[in-house]
């Protein structure tokens, strides 16, 4: 709560030379919504919809979903909210999806892959999101989790458009999607990098294992290189690139991400004021220089040190 009252944070993310960066909140419940509003977030960059399904023993019907989503969206009338479609499986198992028998759930039928098998379920969710968007007046976009190929991205965008949702994007959290980023950016309105899963898949290191925390450190230069590939493609093609994993909540790393071409940052609401005010410290050119230093470092600790030396 201390940084929620951070005086330097005026609710607008801007570098010292005036480049706008959206500073958004991650929301996974109605309680999170309140925190996001108090933190003066500019909107929501990741609305995790699993909460609506987790409590249920079966798929919630469209009306139930509509009112659950509207409860969150009404707090953001006129503001951008990126609603992520159901990301079930692996670390987010659902009682009514029988993925429990897979030998490798993190590599299994999870995220958007569930929607390929149960397309009508995705269509019902999109219908509920479109209705809640209309109820609330929020600037709603949708995005799909765990996209791996450009065909999958096209498939999802078509379904979002069919549901009457104008803005559609995908998460980049599978390395294959990062390697196809130009083609994917051509098919979507925006992408958002999920650094939690991207780190897990880049390093072949389970994100839930404390023993592998070093490999899942978002300061790993190899992860930053993959983010650079995505950020630079976004700059060249003029498409927004967000980060909505834990990496965005670190005020030092957030500025490195901006230096890599990231245009919006979404994080746990409590970190919004600290990240928002940190952005104003230096110009984009300095963040680019900090990013170069981080990319050239041999390990996370030295990447942090090098960036500290540039940004103070
Ligand atoms: C991520 O993978 O970085 C992400 C933002 O999504 P989640 O943590 O919900 O998988
Ligand atoms: Mg993820």
Image: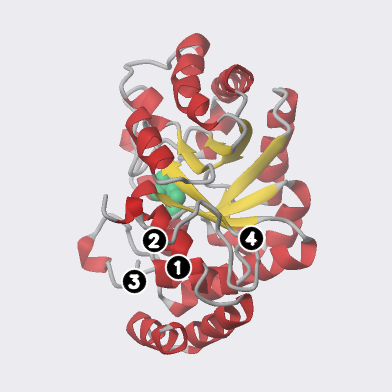
Mark 4 vs 1, N-terminal side: 4
Q: Are marks 1 and 2 in contact (CB under 8 Å)?
A: yes
Whether residue 85 appears in this view of the structure is: yes
Residue at mark 2:
274
* Residue 85 rendering spot, x and y as whole percentages: 53, 33
Can see residue 201? no
Can you identify the residue that label 4 sits on?
Answer: 20
Point 50% across, 10% down: residue: 63
Q: Residues within 10 Å of mark 1 (few under 14, many from 20)?
A: many
Q: Nearer the viewer, residue 237 or 94?
A: 237
- For label 1, the residue is 278
Q: Nearer the viewer, mark 3 or mark 2?
A: 2
Kindly state the secondary structure of the residue where label 1 is placed: helix
Q: Secondary structure at mark 3?
A: loop
Q: CA distance from mark 3 to mark 1?
A: 26 Å
User: Which numbered tag is attached to residue 215?
Assistant: 3
């Amino acid at each position: 709560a201390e940084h929620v009252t951070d005086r330097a944070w005026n609710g607008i993310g801007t570098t010292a030379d005036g480049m706008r960066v959206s500073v958004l909140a991650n929301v996974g419940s109605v309680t999170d919504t309140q925190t996001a509003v108090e933190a003066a977030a500019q909107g929501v960059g990741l609305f995790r919809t699993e909460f609506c399904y987790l409590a249920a023993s079966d798929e919630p019907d469209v009306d139930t979903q509509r009112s659950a989503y509207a409860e969150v969206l009404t707090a953001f009338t006129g503001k951008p909210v990126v609603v992520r479609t159901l990301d079930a499986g692996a670390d987010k198992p659902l009682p009514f999806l029988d993925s429990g028998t897979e030998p490798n759930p993190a590599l299994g039928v999870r995220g958007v892959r569930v929607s390929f098998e149960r397309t009508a379920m995705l269509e019902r969710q999109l219908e509920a999101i479109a209705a809640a968007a209309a109820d609330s007046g929020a600037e709603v976009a949708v995005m799909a989790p765990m996209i791996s190929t450009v065909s999958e991205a096209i498939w999802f965008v078509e379904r979002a458009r069919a549901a009457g949702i104008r803005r559609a994007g995908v998460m980049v959290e599978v390395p294959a999607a990062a390697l196809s980023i130009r083609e994917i950016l051509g098919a979507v309105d925006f992408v958002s990098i999920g650094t939690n899963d991207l780190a897990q898949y880049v390093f072949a290191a389970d994100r839930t294992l404390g023993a592998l925390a070093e490999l899942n450190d978002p300061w790993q230069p190899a992860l930053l290189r993959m983010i650079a590939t995505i950020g630079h493609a976004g700059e060249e093609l003029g498409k927004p690139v967000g980060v909505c994993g834990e990496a965005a909540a670190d005020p030092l790393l957030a500025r490195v991400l901006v230096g890599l071409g990231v245009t919006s940052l979404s994080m746990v609401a409590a970190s919004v004021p600290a990240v928002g005010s940190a952005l104003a410290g230096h110009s984009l050119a300095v963040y680019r220089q900090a990013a170069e230093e981080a990319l050239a470092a041999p390990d996370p600790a030295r990447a942090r040190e090098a960036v500290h030396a540039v940004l103070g």
